[in-house]
Amino acid sequence: MLVAVAVVSLFAIVAGYIAIIRSQGAPPPDNVTTVPFVAGYLLAMAGLLGVSLVERSGIVRLRPALRGAAAGGLLPMGVLALMSIGLAIVIVAGLAIAATVLALTARPSLKATSSAVAAAIVAVVVLAVGFDISWQTIVCPATGQSGGTTVGLFGNGTGYECNDGVLTITSH
């Protein structure tokens, strides 16, 4: 029940997030891939949690890792998004953490705990790399002029200018 609530909540959060973004208009040119990445990542976390509900022996063995990955990915995502949809994500992360703990206590072992921790780390790495890539993807509008600097998560950024659909990198 705990996991099912988390899955349904994630679908509702994604729908609300997309509705909020659409009501605000188009994202700036240096940020067009962030919304699809965030929505996709949240849906992937919902998918991991959903798969963890399957009662097959192979899935049951993977349950701590699946739930650990979702918990590990949702918590930093929620913290990063606290100014918008983050509180809802943090609450769902709490449900995923509780579900992970329950899965670990149902079949306590070092292997299960290690897999949950490793999966959480992988989820955080995927989140960080995904944000870094999405924050640096620039798409120039067909008309008009704009410019700015993208900021990479790992300290790398790119200065750019857009002139009627033509992208010019101004610094690296």
Image (cartoon, rainbow, N blue to C red):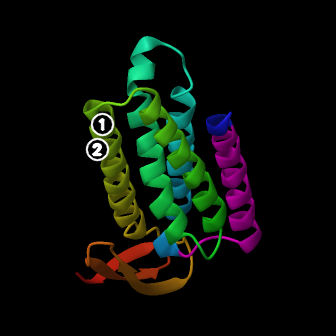
| Main SS class of the magenta portion in the image | helix
Q: Position of residue 76 (x, y in %)?
A: 45, 63
Q: Is residue 22 magenta?
A: yes
The residue at the far left in this view is 172
For residue 74, side relative to residue 153 (left or right): right
* Residue pointed to by mark 2: 118
Disc 2 is placed on an element classified as: helix
Q: Position of residue 133 (x, y in %)?
A: 35, 62
Image quadrant for the C terminus?
bottom left
Residue 108 in view:
yes
Q: Residue at x 42, y 43 (%)?
A: 68
| Distance between the alpha carbons at the discs numbered 1 and 2 | 5 Å
Q: Quadrant of residue 167?
A: bottom left
Q: Is residue 76 above or below residue 68?
A: below
Q: Position of residue 99 (x, y in %)?
A: 54, 40
The amino acid pointed to by label 2 is Ala
Q: Nearer the viewer, residue 20 or 110?
A: 110
- Magenta range: 5-28
* Residue pointed to by mark 1: 115
Q: Residue at x 57, y 25 (%)?
A: 53
For residue 39, side relative to residue 131 (left or right): right
Q: Residue at x 38, y 22 (%)?
A: 61
Q: Residues within 10 Å of mark 1 (few under 14, many from 20)?
A: many
The amino acid pointed to by label 1 is Ser
